[in-house]
Image (tube, coloured by chain):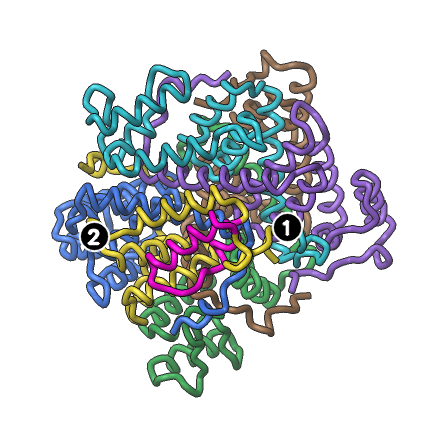
Chain colours: A purple, B cyan, C blue, D yellow, E green, F brown
Amino acid sequence: MTMVPLIDYRDASAEVRAVYDDIMRTRGTDWINNFWKALANDPASLRRTWESIKQVMAPGALDPLTKELVYLAVSASNGCAYCTASHGAAAKKQGMTPQMLAELLAVIGMANETNALANAYRVPVDERFEKLF
Amino acid sequence: MTMVPLIDYRDASAEVRAVYDDIMRTRGTDWINNFWKALANDPASLRRTWESIKQVMAPGALDPLTKELVYLAVSASNGCAYCTASHGAAAKKQGMTPQMLAELLAVIGMANETNALANAYRVPVDERFEKLF
Amino acid sequence: MTMVPLIDYRDASAEVRAVYDDIMRTRGTDWINNFWKALANDPASLRRTWESIKQVMAPGALDPLTKELVYLAVSASNGCAYCTASHGAAAKKQGMTPQMLAELLAVIGMANETNALANAYRVPVDERFEKLF
Amino acid sequence: MTMVPLIDYRDASAEVRAVYDDIMRTRGTDWINNFWKALANDPASLRRTWESIKQVMAPGALDPLTKELVYLAVSASNGCAYCTASHGAAAKKQGMTPQMLAELLAVIGMANETNALANAYRVPVDERFEKLF
Amino acid sequence: MTMVPLIDYRDASAEVRAVYDDIMRTRGTDWINNFWKALANDPASLRRTWESIKQVMAPGALDPLTKELVYLAVSASNGCAYCTASHGAAAKKQGMTPQMLAELLAVIGMANETNALANAYRVPVDERFEKLF
Amino acid sequence: MTMVPLIDYRDASAEVRAVYDDIMRTRGTDWINNFWKALANDPASLRRTWESIKQVMAPGALDPLTKELVYLAVSASNGCAYCTASHGAAAKKQGMTPQMLAELLAVIGMANETNALANAYRVPVDERFEKLF
């Protein structure tokens, strides 16, 4: 079903295993999800993508739960079933409750509705919105 | 430039003014942005869309800043320039700092990259992700 | 601003002029809009695209106004500003009133909202919907 | 497979049943499709979304079949499998024939092609298209 | 599972068979994939779409492998599972190696990330980029 | 017009200048385009995004022109005006001729048309396409 074989830990090269180990250590888990097993067909992509995600999702001015909610929102809005499932699980692990999920989905729905309306009406940006910072 | 005339307060019907008044009261502002002035060409759409936004964006299990960050993320990811500008301003009003904006944009960027990769590799959803709640 | 020069009738080759003439004759107009002037840089694409549009938009089981409303809806939903403007004008020429436009935009908005929600909730297709014809 | 449990009528609260009853009464059916069963996890979203759909899809300047064709077109263009299936069924119930479906899909296909071309060529909007109403 | 029946060669009209024959002859294959079997419900769409694809994908200034890589990239980026699978197979037949696929997917991923960032930051186009040819 | 100030070389920190210098050295240019000037508001994002692009776009199994054509195709298909302009310029610098651009755009157009059709018809993936490598 995938475009490439999924590479399990036991079949992985040392280079790939090093990334898998870092993923499990960083996340406190003992398994690797399919996204990384697909990317592992190209070890350079695997490493680059993981290093980027690790940097971007680390705590900062935004806390990890907020970051996961945003990741889930973008993924769901884009209709990426895999990412919706995996970041849904990640957000839940970070503390997302069913009520938070429900409100998140409502915001995603409204944003998609008004994005379509603003584009469809071709609304010009208000002068007051132009200078953000 | 828009598909319809923008209806200013002074030219609006009583029905439209009632919605405009509620928008300004709820937001604590003294002006109406162009999105609503376009929607006002169809008072039923204006009222329905505003009532929905008001409900969805009210404080709940998610706080108003988180909701605005999510709204901005979806709008930016969808490439809606108007909504990116208007919800960028709204998020800033709710307390979004330049550092929070930078981290938010980084998450949006990574989400779009991995959404494309997951779709492109046609990665199957892991069994463990299937049961969320 | 465009990726290619816009080719005016007076500068066009005989091959391009033949398509331009057919566009104006079919539409009952005396000018060519920019979309075709861009495509004219590749006469084969110009001819193929115009022939396809002419076939697809001809009256059939769906009348020309319905076809234009659908074209406008897809274009607006996709956020294509050029196509929203040009098919908005075409739909108006076919009889779209301001009230029809308002209702059309409301449907586009709701469709985008519920599309996002159905994807976000990962709703499985009901058995009863599977056999359409 | 979904992000939330699907709530059947027999397990629903009185608040949810009231919406389910209105859906079945309005549509003249005796069952509830999965979209609403997912939304029912958040009764406020269920009610708001249903009330909006009911208003937007009611007969007006556009007849119900045209509205369903537009809804189907946007959903299919957005690649929402659930909405394509459900609004395909709804359009058929409103009278869409196989020939109408074929023509609708052809328009959707052409719109997506020319939307991509107009964006790719970065075609500027013609002055004549700017003033729609 | 599809919106229409899939029409096999043995059940096809002479008009449809003529297109099927041309597809197999052009591609040097002895079978028809499901996309065409769905389109065959509307012989005019089948013929028009096939003729367009045949023209567009013929060798020209770009070689067939490059064209298939681009087709695959757009399809994967759009999240079209069917087209990703079918054009993945077509690209492989034209000579795409696993390493080429890996690099192609990495480019698709980066393009989607930076597209989102450019839209999210609302970056203005540099004057120097405006005049392409 | 942008969400953040654009940071010119003369106003940049040493950390940002180091990335700017590497961009100019790698590309053999003497100026920085606006995309990087926006990202420079978040030096970590600037560095990470540039390092990723540099790796992904380096010559490999795919040559630099093919990579730029794919980047341009995805950007144009996504409707990202900035990226279409900047990667159009980059592709031209790598050797893309007007005829190559015309053919590229035709492939993008057809891919978007058939992606929409495959989704709209909900065509099931052929068994023969499932095992790619």
Looking at the rendered image, the quarter that the C terminus of chain D falls into is top left
Q: Relative to F133, does residue E111 appear above or below in the rendering?
A: above
**Residue type beneath disc 2:** Tyr
* D23 sits left or right of B9 in the view: right
Pick whichever, E65 or A67, lies toward us.
A67
E85 part of magenta stretch = no
Q: Are marks 2 and 1 on the same chain?
A: no
Q: Residue at x 65, y 28 (%)?
A: F45
Per the picture, the main secondary structure of the magenta-coloured stretch is helix
Which element carries disc 2, helix, strand or loop?
helix
Up-down relation of residue D38 to residue B113 (above or below) = below
- Residue extending farthest top: F11
* Residue at image coords 72%, 41%: A93
Is the N terminus of chain D in the top left, top right, bottom left or bottom right quadrant? bottom right
Percent x, y of residue F125: 55, 68
* Alpha carbons under labels 2 and 1: distance apart: 50 Å
Under circle 1, the secondary element is helix
Q: Which residues are magenta?
A: D13-40
Query: Residue E53, image x and y in percent?
Result: 42, 64
Q: Is residue B123 left or right of residue A112?
A: right
Residue A85's disc is: 1
Q: How many marks?
A: 2
Residue E110: tell me if it is visible. Answer: no
* Residue closer to the observer: D89 or E126: D89
Q: Is residue D10 left or right of residue B52?
A: right
Q: Which residue is mark 2?
A: C20
Q: Residue furthest front?
A: D14
